[in-house]
Image (cartoon, rainbow, N blue to C red):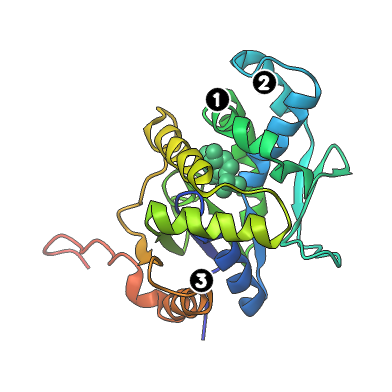
């Protein structure tokens, strides 16, 4: 049975989108491309360079000059992909609280987004890819074979992030995480360029009451039944074949 070659998965922070996309990619033997990693890597490089993040032209120029790549190399440290910035492995560093706190501003920079678009499309063009982000189904891959929008309540998303942090031995405060997610939701969905948006032809998957395994299974079933979710071809006008 033919499977969709490109799968776009969008959703808000903490919806489980990245871990579900990764598990799905493993099950299907696809490359998992976490597009948030591109914006995180640019944020890291800008912070390291001491850039003023409100200087959109300066940050966009840095994004254009950066060589960013995502590979399917899983190493042996629990990573879901490998993120390279100018040849350096930054897979873990891009998830620091400092990058968390600044990435939304960088992701709202039109010049940065423009610079990332070509790299993201080139990765998807290789085929057999699951690309996860905020605007994949709407902007990056509007013609993706299958689009899924993964969602969960703010409360549930905060609980998951909290558990993740505690699980990896980091300090965590539930109220603070919840407030951080709420602020990022607002910035990500209200920005002028490529806001977090559910594509009209995306399959909606609410994971609030689902376990991780149930969510992966639900997403897998959506992939198997992808033909049912494709938009019907426009019917030919009367009198034409
Ligand atoms: O999914 P994440 O938390 O790693 O995303 C990091 C930031 O990048 C977040 O502010 C949303 C933004 N982002 C985006 O604007 N577009 C994407 N396709 C992916 C992420």
What label does residue 59 carry, if any?
2
Quote the CA–CA distance across marks 3 and 2.
Answer: 35 Å
Please rate how many residues cluster around mark 1, counting C-alpha atoms within 10 Å: few if below 14, some from 14 to 19, many from 20.
many
User: Disc 2, disc 1: CB below 8 Å?
Assistant: yes
- Location of residue 87 with respect to 81 vertically, above or below: above
How far across and down, in percent of the image, does residue 85 sit? 81, 39
- Location of residue 235 with respect to 27 vertically, above or below: above
How far across and down, in percent of the image, does residue 13 sit? 50, 49
How far across and down, in percent of the image, does residue 223 sit? 47, 75
Residue identified by numbered label 1: 109
In this rendering, position of residue 67 left or right of residue 193? right
What label does residue 180 carry, if any?
none
- Location of residue 63 with respect to 35 vertically, above or below: above
Looking at the rendered structure, the secondary structure element under dot 1 is: loop
Please rate how many residues cluster around mark 3, counting C-alpha atoms within 10 Å: few if below 14, some from 14 to 19, many from 20.
some
At a point 44% along the width and 50% down the height, the residue shown is 142
At a point 66% along the width and 58% down the height, the residue shown is 166
> Which of the 4 quarters of the picture holds residue 55?
top right
Q: Which of the two residues, 172 or 187, is positioned nearer the viewer here?
A: 172
Which marked residue is nearer to the observer: mark 3 or mark 1? 1
What label does residue 4 carry, if any?
3
């Amino acid at each position: 049975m033919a499977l969709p070659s490109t799968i776009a998965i969008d959703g808000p922070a903490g919806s489980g989108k990245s871990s579900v996309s990764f598990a799905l990619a493993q099950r299907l033997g696809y490359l998992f491309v976490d597009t948030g990693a591109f914006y995180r890597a640019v944020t890291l490089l800008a912070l390291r360079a001491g850039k003023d993040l409100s200087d959109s032209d300066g940050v966009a120029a840095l994004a254009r000059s950066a060589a960013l790549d995502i590979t399917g190399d899983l190493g042996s440290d629990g990573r879901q992909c490998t993120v390279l910035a100018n040849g350096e492995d930054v897979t873990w560093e891009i998830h620091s609280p400092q990058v968390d706190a600044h990435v939304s501003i960088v992701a709202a920079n039109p010049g940065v987004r423009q610079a990332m678009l070509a790299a993201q499309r080139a990765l998807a063009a290789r085929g057999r890819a699951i690309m996860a982000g905020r605007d994949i189904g709407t902007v990056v891959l509007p013609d993706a074979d299958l689009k899924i929008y993964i969602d969960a309540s703010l409360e549930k998303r905060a609980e998951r992030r909290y558990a993740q942090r505690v699980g990896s031995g980091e300090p965590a405060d539930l109220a603070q995480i919840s407030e951080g997610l709420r602020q990022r939701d607002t910035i990500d969905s209200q920005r002028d360029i490529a806001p977090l948006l559910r594509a009209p032809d995306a399959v909606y998957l609410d994971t609030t009451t689902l376990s991780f395994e149930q969510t992966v299974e639900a997403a897998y079933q959506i992939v198997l039944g992808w033909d049912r979710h494709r938009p019907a071809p426009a019917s030919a006008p009367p009198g034409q074949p």
